[in-house]
Image: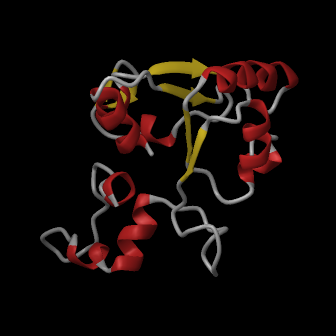
Amino acid sequence: GPLATHILAQMGAEVVKVENPNKMDFARIGFNQVDGSSVLYHQLNHNKEEFLVDYTSKDGKVAIEARIKEADVLVEQFRPGAMDAWGFGYEAVKAINPKIVYVSLTGYGQTGSYSKTAGHDINYLALSGIMSLLKDDSGKPVVPDTQFADISG
C-alpha cells in the first residue's frame, strides 16, 4: 500500500492518504525522527496529501464519501472485513462511485487461516525465517530499524 501509492504519486497521480487522528499510521513511530515522524514515514508519504479524519464518526463518513465520489482508485490495506465494518467495503464504495477501482491489500490474503491476522513487518520477517538471519555480534535477534518486508513484500 504505502510503497505502491508512493510510486503512483511519483508518476503523477494525486494520492490522498487518509488517517484517523485517533489511530495514526504506525509507520510514524520509529527511529530517526524528523518533524515528529519517522524517516520511513516521510519517505513513503512526502508526495501525498494527508487527510486526517475520524472515519468511524458520522461526520467523518460523510467526508470520506465526498472524497470517494471524486476518486479514481481506492487502495486499502486493512484486515478483511474492516472496511465493511466502517461502511466502506467494496459494494458500498461502488454504490458511491461505480467507476472506482477498489484495491484491497492484506498481509495474508482475503481467505485462509491467517487472513484475519494483523500483518506487520516483524511477523513477516519471523514467518519467512529472515529474523533468524538478523543478529547482533552475540547472536541475539535484532529488530530492523526500518520495515522492508511490509513495505516491499
- Of residue 88 and residue 132, the one placed in the foreground of this image is 88
- Pinpoint residue 103: horizontal percent, then vertical percent: 55, 48
Residue in the picture at 65% in, 74% down: 111
In this view, which residue lies farthest toward the front?
Answer: 99
Structure colour scheme = secondary structure
- Of residue 33 and residue 26, the one placed in the foreground of this image is 26
- Pinpoint residue 64: horizontal percent, then vertical percent: 71, 24
Quick check: 51 above or below 142? Answer: above
Quick check: 114 above or below 8? Answer: below
Q: Is residue 139 left or right of residue 150?
A: left
Residue in the picture at 62% in, 51% down: 78
Image quadrant in which you'd find residue 56 = top right
The quadrant the C terminus occupies is bottom left
Residue in the picture at 83% in, 18% down: 59
Quick check: 52 above or below 38? Answer: above
Q: Is residue 53 visible?
A: no
- Pinpoint residue 13: horizontal percent, then vertical percent: 39, 25
Image quadrant in which you'd find residue 115 = bottom right
For the image, the number of numbered tags is: 0
Quick check: 18 above or below 149? Answer: above
- Pinpoint residue 65: horizontal percent, then vertical percent: 75, 25
Residue in the picture at 36% in, 51% down: 151
Q: Is residue 82 left or right of residue 78?
A: right
Q: Is residue 94 visible?
A: yes
Q: Is residue 28 left or right of residue 105?
A: left
- Of residue 136 and residue 85, the one placed in the foreground of this image is 85
In this view, which residue lies farthest toward the left?
Answer: 137
Q: Is residue 95 left or right of residue 132?
A: right
